[in-house]
Image: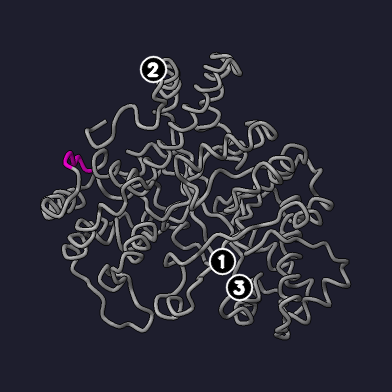
Amino acid sequence: MSSLVDPDLLFPAEPSVRRIARELYGLVKSLPIVSPHGHTEPRWYALNEPFPDPAQLLIVPDHYVFRMLFSQGVRLEDLGVPVLDGAPVETDGRKIWRLFAENYFLFRGTPTRLWFDYVLSDLFGVTEPLTAANADRHYDAIAECLQREEFRPRALFERFNIEVIATTDGALDDLAWHRQIRESGWQGRVITAYRPDAVVDPDFDGFAGNLDRLGEITGCDTGSWAGYLDAHRQRRAYFKSCGATSTDHGHATAETANLSRAAAQELFNRIRAGSTDERERRLFRAQMLTEMAKMSLDDGLVLQVHPGSWRNHSPSMLKRFGRDKGFDIPTSTDYVAALKPLLDAVGLERDLTVIVFTLDESSYARELAPLAGVYPALKLGPAWWFHDSPEGMRRFREMTTETAGFYNTVGFNDDTRAFPSIPARHDVARRVDCAFLARLVSEHRLREDEACELAPELAYTLAKKAYRL
């Protein structure tokens, strides 16, 4: 590994524990990457065109990068982030890169700095820390790389040793890029995941029109409860035909409900008619999580729940720049009461997998680990989003292992739009887990041979098993 990333990155400082961590890491560092949930673009792999300039690849689409800069007074327009009304923004990649380099010091101590240094050194061969003084030189070196065949999406997919990657696509997506990938003859495994938020969340922009479109696509009567559910079943089957093994749900809360058929139909009728009652809209979202779990029991798709984010916290930024611009903020989240209706309905099913994530770390030991430690259907997703960091990963293991163990968790997933950072994210997770296992061995809480079995499970096997890959 090059000079920007120390070989003992994230390993314990105590020499005897560090030795164990190194040995465990040696078992997993070269394992294939299983990326079962993420947001890379399927068109990249379908078209296999060169990536754009360094700024467009590494800065403009990455909210981890531009939210930090914005917090220090840098305008998003100056970073090339598009404006919804089409107003002019900076398009000169070199200027954007220079601005980023001038402010790179702001990322000291953050996981973004770890990932970015890893990408610079391991992918592009950069050996000098990025500064304003060498910004142009680094930009030119990266830009030259991006023009080469070995830096196109498919070549990088293979270089990164990715065994499978899942994109996340809306329920109304025609999945044309996925079909093109499959028809191209390329052997890289790129699958989709069913994300129905636009047609299950009454607060989603254009919800009524989205339901109309869902009916057009499926030929189902989405004006009726039965037809609406049938439309979901059809879309899920279509996504499965394009490789999907999971669904994904980004609800604001983990609330679930299990209404009678008659009550659910009556609720749907009110929602379809445009009910503005917030209680009814919340209840509908809650009911749909349980309906999706029941469908998963039938069709085998793993259900992922990603609750606890106050999406688009700034209305003015949402209006100007749209969704996913760094203004999603974690909230406290209840799971014990919220998940009970769903768990009452299907929680004891051994053939169902419901993976729950959280942005509320206080719930790990108090709620999530005890729930996953007893309900066969429930598994814990890894430290996610704001906690996808060395400290967040350590806290996850420390707070969940004693109650849920390792085998009620699902390994690691990178959940990223930043394709070049995927190896870095997985490497960080592997290092943190190896350090955690090494500590258990050093404290005589785990035999070293058990740690040698666990390390590959955490890095590779658990994700494959949980996501049925």
- The residue lying at 69 percent from left, 40 percent from top is 369
Q: Is residue 222 left or right of residue 468?
A: right
Q: Earlier in the sequence, mark 2 or mark 1?
A: 2
Query: Which numbered marker is on residue 151?
Result: none
Q: Are marks 2 and 1 in contact (CB under 8 Å)?
A: no
Q: Secondary structure at mark 2?
A: helix
What is the CA distance from the residue labelled 2 to the residue labelled 3?
61 Å
Residue 54 location (% of width, % of height): 23, 56
Q: Is residue 304 left or right of residue 299?
A: left
Query: Which amino acid lies under the numbered mark 3 shown in the image of this protein?
Result: Ile
Residue 53 location (% of width, % of height): 21, 59
What is the CA distance from the residue labelled 3 to the residue labelled 1?
31 Å
Q: Earlier in the sequence, mark 2 or mark 3?
A: 2
Magenta residues, dominant SS class: loop
Query: Which amino acid lies under the numbered mark 1 shown in the image of this protein?
Result: Trp
Residue 307 location (% of width, % of height): 62, 58
Q: Is residue 111 magenta?
A: no
Which span of residues is magenta-colored? 124-128
Answer few, some or many: residues within 10 Å of disc 1's Cα (few below 14, many 20 plus, some between 14 and 19): some
> Looking at the image, is 119 positioned above or below residue 255?
above
Q: Is residue 127 magenta?
A: yes
> Looking at the image, is 275 positioned above or below residue 99?
below
